[in-house]
Image: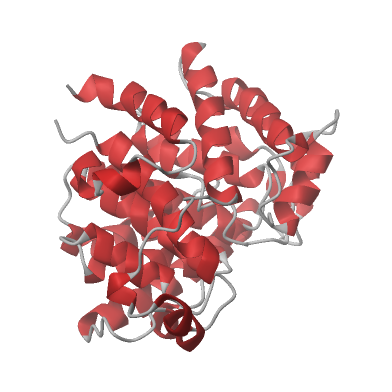
């Protein structure tokens, strides 16, 4: 059995741990510290960042929501909100988390409607780097998957581009887990984005749009999808003349913002679709948000290749291994 959910979650954490020591460094500094990028080794100990911690928080919230019945907004918000607040207060929340997550989670820790806690001006990558579990849950409709991906983003990052990038990231994970040819992904994502740009999922987002400066829900949502379509333009241009030795951030952006994290993480994966560890190493040796870029590249490679994508010696010592394996087994089980 391929065990795509396990492969996705372990790959995400491995990318996070590999990219943690190289974040905020330029490529020459990384090469001076780590040696040739194709030989980069997983640090000892293999410690992850808030990227994996928040992925696990979302995954636990999703598990609770699904245990209570069909996935709907009212069933999803409370457990995910509670998990995010628990993460905010955890003593292990000491991995340089992003300001948007901290501010939003502090506001979620109370009675405010979640739309008032959401940071509608932020499109940082902190929402789409954690969204992979949404793409792994079997049996969801397209509407449920898109709605859940955007809602989990909106709890912290309410900018329309953060919502759209999270939706697209979950879509990539789902498509790869279902066996989509990686080479077809850019075109399929473009088609999906174009079909989505006129739809504001009010059932899932409520009046979130009214907290921004947009004149209508349609105007709000189109801003996000159009920025993601521009990022896909840059991705496709890079893939027309691929250069694996060039820093991927030069082609698709440094990944601090949502649409760039998606495009650059996907570029690293698509440069090496049959070499998951090489894709991870390329993503970790980048001049931008290397842990989040490698996090996404690892999730995509794991969804494509399954649990066997990763060296056993790496997978055995990743932080949070037992919980990652437990959640992976939960969502792999229906695929048997």
Residue nearest the viewer, comparing 78 with 15: 15
Locate the N terminus and report the quarter of the image it occupies: top left
Q: Position of residue 161 (x, y in %)?
A: 56, 61
Residue 247 vertical placement versus 52 (above, below)? below
**Tally of marks:** 0
Can residue 185 be spotted in the picture? yes
Residue nearest the viewer, comparing 206 with 113: 113
Residue 160 appears left or right of 235: right
Can residue 198 be spotted in the picture? no
Q: Position of residue 317 (x, y in %)?
A: 40, 42
Residue 329 vertical placement versus 213 (above, below)? above
Residue 45 appears left or right of 42: right
Q: Position of residue 311 (x, y in %)?
A: 24, 49
Q: How is the image coloured?
A: secondary structure
Q: Residue drawn at (42%, 82%), measured in percent from left and top?
A: 31
Residue 215 appears left or right of 201: right
Residue nearest the viewer, comparing 147 with 28: 28
Residue 107 vertical placement versus 22 (above, below)? above
Locate the C terminus and report the quarter of the image it occupies: top left
Q: Residue drawn at (39%, 58%), measured in percent from left and top?
A: 42
Res 333 → quadrant: top left
Q: Residue drawn at (60%, 57%), measured in percent from left and top?
A: 160
Res 40 → quadrant: bottom left
Q: Position of residue 28 (x, y in %)?
A: 46, 88
Q: Residue furthest front?
A: 44
Res 221 → quadrant: bottom right
């Amino acid at each position: 059995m391929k065990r795509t959910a396990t492969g996705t979650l372990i790959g995400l954490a491995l990318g996070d741990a590999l990219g943690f020591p190289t974040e905020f460094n330029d490529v020459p500094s990384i090469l001076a510290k780590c040696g040739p990028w194709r030989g980069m080794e997983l640090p000892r100990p293999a410690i992850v960042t808030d990227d994996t911690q928040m992925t696990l928080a979302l995954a636990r919230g999703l598990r609770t929501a699904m245990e209570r019945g069909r996935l709907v907004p009212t069933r999803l918000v409370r457990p995910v909100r509670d998990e995010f607040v628990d993460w905010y207060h955890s003593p292990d929340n000491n991995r340089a988390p992003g300001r948007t997550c901290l501010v939003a989670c502090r506001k979620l820790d109370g009675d405010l409607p979640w739309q008032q806690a959401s940071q509608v001006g932020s499109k940082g990558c902190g929402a789409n780097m954690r969204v992979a579990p949404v793409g792994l849950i079997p049996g969801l409709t397209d509407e449920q998957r898109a709605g859940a991906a955007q809602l989990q983003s909106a709890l912290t990052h309410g900018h329309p581009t953060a919502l759209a990038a999270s939706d697209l990231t979950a879509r990539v994970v789902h498509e790869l887990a279902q066996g989509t040819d990686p080479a077809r992904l850019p075109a399929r994502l473009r088609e999906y984005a174009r079909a989505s740009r006129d739809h504001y999922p009010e059932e899932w987002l409520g009046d979130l749009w009214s907290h921004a400066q947009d004149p209508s829900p349609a105007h709000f949502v189109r801003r996000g999808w159009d920025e993601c379509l521009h990022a896909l333009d840059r991705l496709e241009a890079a893939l027309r003349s691929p250069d694996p030795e060039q820093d991927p951030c030069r082609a698709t952006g440094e990944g601090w913002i949502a649409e760039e994290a998606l495009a650059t993480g996907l570029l690293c994966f698509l440069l090496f679709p049959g070499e998951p560890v090489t894709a991870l190493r390329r993503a970790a040796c980048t001049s931008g948000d290397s842990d989040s870029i490698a996090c996404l590249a690892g999730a995509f490679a794991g969804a494509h290749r399954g649990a066997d994508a990763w060296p056993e010696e790496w997978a055995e010592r990743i932080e949070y291994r037992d919980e990652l394996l437990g959640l992976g087994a939960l969502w792999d089980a229906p695929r048997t």
